[in-house]
Image: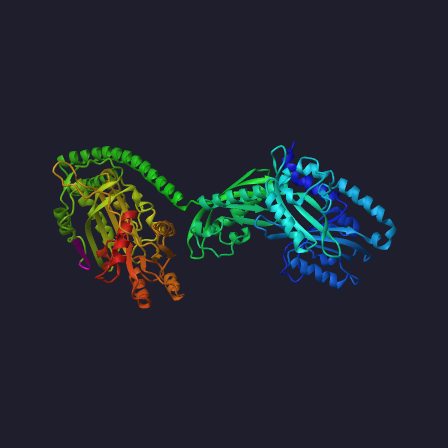
């Protein structure tokens, strides 16, 4: 059974419905051409006028006026409403059937806690008979007394001369004790019902009497004898003599405690919900099927990291942005859920922004249904799970490669055993007397065994089951020696450059395996440049930490040596990049490659405790980064600490971020915003220049070097500096800085480059350095 508290509002509405007086509540919109609109009428209005409440709500009270309604009286009413005073008038109104009747009209403003008018309440009484038959005055008095007894409002009469005070039975219900027989204006503070606001009540009443007005409104709180608090609205009429002296005060006291409590509870609930909606990372949404409305956390597209039109709110509009591959599945899932008796709904689908970027959106909702099963509302959340799914996909791919490696290793071992048998028998045949054709056949068997042995060694390398002679590698010697060996197998149309700094750390791995890995990468680069080009083999010292998300290469924090092989060849599209480390995957023609080159490098890096990553763009070239642990055993020099001194940031400086990868762009934008910068993000050079054309100004351009759309980062920087020469530039890339020339870019004396992946502290230092320069 519902509690009394939860039924108070219902009781209040029922009580109003039983009042014989007409109660009409309007809003306070005085600026509208038609004036305030009706929001509530009680049953008495329907009974007298013949109008159903649904015909009145939303209408102007003018609906009751007709030809004989006095215009001057209406003007006084309008003037009284604008003056924010209580109004009492008599005028002719009209029923739905066009018959007229007289009413005694009392209109009072309803104030909030800040004394702002929020509504008007009109109490009307049919005085047709009083006007027509003066002899029925006693009957009207009796009706008033009956109404006073039946009313849930306290009705009182106060004689200011004799101090006599009368109130109906509802007075005790509201205030908790019987009404006093006498009340003195100058001693209102002695009455317990005004204990909370007694000074305020005394002042308002005295001011109303002295002002000469005939009406006033008093909104006050009080304490009942049992200690509970209450809230009432007093609407009073002052009876004066011909000289204007106040004689009596007649009024009503409406208990608005339930309404006040409900409003306070609603405000508190809305405030809690707003705080939750503003603080949680998920997007909250509420769809009301009966009202036909849908609400979502304000600014939800930006919070999800996707660009949509500002007015996209309705589910059908959002559906237009759903990835075509997911659209039919999403609609079917949603409709089938509504038709079922399910209490929850979950879905995951792609959402395409105006800039072409796609995110993966996970939606989960609770379904509220009527007893008959019909859906009333759905309340849920939405979350951008793009990065999470990519990490899962990467983990799944790593586990798959691990499983394939284990299987491949087993096959290679078994194959080696079979090769031993074939090669051993071939050697026995060589011991015998062979003619020319027989010797040629044995030689072919030996050659095939040699090729097969090399293949199994590659398989064992991928599966990390080949034996590595781990030790100290001096890259200053190894890299040039390897390049010298490569020149014999690389055509003259392709140049090879070697860039090894003098301070490069020593690596910890197998020197022969590293040489083989570099050769494999160089051969791949050669094949990607059939018409010639450039290969750059370089080394760098790198420090890794967990702060490099979302660019983390899954390396344990520490010191590493980076060996990079860069070419300016054909490059690879994303669908090829995702498979390059898989064994036997190749884009070469049949018979021109085994597909084990990169998979062997992958296995070597993993077995060495390192990692291999690859950057490539179609028609731009490829960089393969091989990370190997630094040799730090006895006698090795320690590298710099991972910690870097925090620079002083200039909060509020404007940064234009240009990055074509949506998840990277969203992460860096959030990172820069947390640092205190004002960030505007773009996906390519065209969008960035459009922002400048619209008059936006920036202190710094932070852009990837390789961008889609035919304009690279350097060209974008040059165009922006034509508009504003003061704009500073910081580049970022997964490619080495010296490789830009081979990627089709010009050298820049003042080029400032932040290599991917980077830590947040590295970004802070780079930005502070460039902005202060």
Q: Give the quadrant of the N terminus.
A: top right
**Residue 773, horizontal then vertical, whole percent:** 24, 59
> Which residue is drawn at the image coordinates 68% and 56% (left, top)?
212
> Which residue is drawn at the image coordinates 64% and 45% (left, top)?
186
Place residue 226 in its image quadrant: top right
Magenta region: which residues? 492-498
500 left or right, relative to 12: left
Place residue 435 in its image quadrant: top left
437 left or right, relative to 698: left
> Which residue is drawn at the image coordinates 47% and 52% (left, top)?
299
Q: Can residue 300 be seen in this view?
A: yes
**Residue 213, horizontal then vertical, whole percent:** 68, 55
Q: Is residue 578 above or below residue 719?
A: above
Q: Of all residues shown, which one is farthest toward the bottom?
A: 722
The one of 76 and 190 positioned closer to us in this rendering: 190
Most common secondary structure along the magenta stretch: strand
């Amino acid at each position: 059974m519902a509690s009394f508290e939860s039924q108070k509002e219902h009781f209040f509405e029922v009580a109003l419905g039983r009042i014989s007086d007409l109660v009409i509540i309007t809003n306070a919109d005085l600026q509208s051409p038609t004036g305030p609109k009706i929001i509530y009428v009680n049953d008495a209005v329907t009974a007298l006028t013949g109008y159903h409440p649904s015909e009145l709500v939303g209408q102007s009270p003018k609906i009751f006026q007709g030809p004989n309604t006095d215009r001057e009286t209406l003007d006084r009413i309008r003037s009284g409403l604008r003056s924010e005073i209580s109004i009492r008038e008599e005028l002719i109104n009209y029923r739905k059937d066009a018959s007229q009747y007289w009413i005694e009209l009392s209109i009072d403003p309803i104030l909030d806690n800040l004394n702002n008018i929020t509504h008007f309440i009109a109490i009307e009484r049919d005085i047709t008979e009083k006007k027509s038959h003066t002899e029925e005055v006693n009957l009207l008095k009796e009706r008033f007394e009956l109404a006073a007894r039946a009313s849930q409002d306290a009705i009182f009469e106060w004689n200011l001369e004799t101090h006599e005070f009368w109130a109906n039975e509802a007075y005790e219900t509201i205030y908790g004790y019987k009404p006093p027989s006498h009340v003195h204006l100058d001693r209102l503070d002695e009455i317990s019902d005004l204990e909370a606001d007694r000074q305020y009540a005394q002042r308002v009443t005295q001011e109303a009497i002295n002002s000469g007005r005939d009406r006033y409104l008093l909104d006050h709180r009080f304490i009942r004898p049992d200690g509970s608090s209450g809230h009432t609205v007093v609407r009073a009429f002052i009876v004066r003599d011909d000289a204007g002296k106040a004689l009596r005060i007649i009024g009503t006291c409406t208990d608005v405690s339930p309404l006040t409590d409900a409003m306070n509870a609603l405000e508190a609930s809305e405030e809690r919900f707003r705080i939750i909606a503003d603080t949680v990372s998920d997007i909250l949404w509420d769809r009301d099927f009966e009202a036909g409305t849908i609400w979502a956390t304000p600014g939800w597209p930006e919070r999800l990291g996707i660009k949509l039109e500002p007015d996209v709110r309705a589910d059908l509009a959002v559906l237009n942005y759903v990835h075509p591959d997911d659209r039919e599945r999403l609609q079917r899932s949603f409709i089938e859920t509504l038709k079922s008796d399910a209490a929850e709904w979950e879905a995951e689908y792609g959402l395409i922004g105006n800039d072409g970027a796609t995110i993966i959106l996970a939606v989960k909702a609770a379904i509220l249904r009527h007893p008959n099963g019909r859906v009333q509302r759905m309340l849920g959340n939405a979350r951008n799970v793009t990065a999470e799914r990519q990490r899962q996909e990467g983990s799944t791919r790593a586990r798959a490669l691990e499983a394939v490696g284990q299987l491949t290793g087993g096959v290679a071992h078994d194959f080696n055993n079979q090769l031993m048998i074939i090669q051993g028998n071939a050697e026995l045949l060589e011991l015998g007397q062979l003619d020319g054709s027989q010797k040629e056949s044995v030689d072919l068997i030996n050659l095939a065994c040699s090729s097969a042995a090399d293949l199994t060694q590659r398989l064992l390398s991928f599966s990390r089951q080949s034996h590595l002679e781990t030790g100290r590698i001096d890259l200053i010697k190894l890299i040039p020696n390897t390049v010298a060996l490569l020149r014999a197998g690389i055509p003259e149309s392709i140049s090879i450059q070697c860039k090894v700094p003098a301070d490069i750390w020593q690596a910890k791995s197998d020197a022969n395996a590293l040489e083989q890995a570099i050769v494999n990468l160089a051969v791949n680069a050669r094949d990607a440049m059939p018409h010639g080009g450039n290969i750059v083999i370089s080394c760098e010292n790198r420090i890794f930490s967990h702060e490099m998300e979302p660019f983390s290469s899954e390396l344990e924090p520490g010191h590493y040596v980076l060996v990079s092989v860069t070419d300016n060849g054909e490059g690879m599209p994303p669908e090829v990049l995702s498979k390059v480390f898989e064994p036997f995957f190749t884009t070469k023609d049949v018979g021109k490659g085994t597909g084990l080159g990169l998979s062997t490098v992958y296995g070597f890096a993993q077995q060495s405790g390192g990692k291999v990553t690859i950057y490539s763009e179609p028609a731009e070239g490829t960089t393969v980064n091989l990370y190997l642990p630094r040799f730090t055993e006895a006698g090795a020099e320690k590298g710099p600490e991972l910690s870097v001194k925090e620079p002083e940031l200039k909060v509020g400086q404007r940064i234009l971020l240009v990055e074509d990868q949506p998840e990277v762009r969203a992460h860096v934008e959030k990172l820069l915003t947390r640092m205190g910068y004002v960030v505007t993000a773009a996906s390519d050079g065209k969008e960035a220049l459009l922002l400048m054309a619209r008059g936006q100004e920036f202190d710094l351009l932070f852009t990837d070097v390789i961008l889609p759309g035919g304009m690279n980062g350097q060209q974008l920087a040059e165009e922006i500096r034509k508009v504003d020469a003061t704009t500073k530039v910081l580049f970022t890339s997964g490619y080495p800085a010296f490789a830009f020339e081979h990627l089709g870019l010009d050298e820049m004396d003042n080029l400032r480059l932040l290599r991917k992946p980077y830590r947040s502290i590295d970004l802070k230092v780079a930005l502070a350095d460039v902005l202060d320069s």
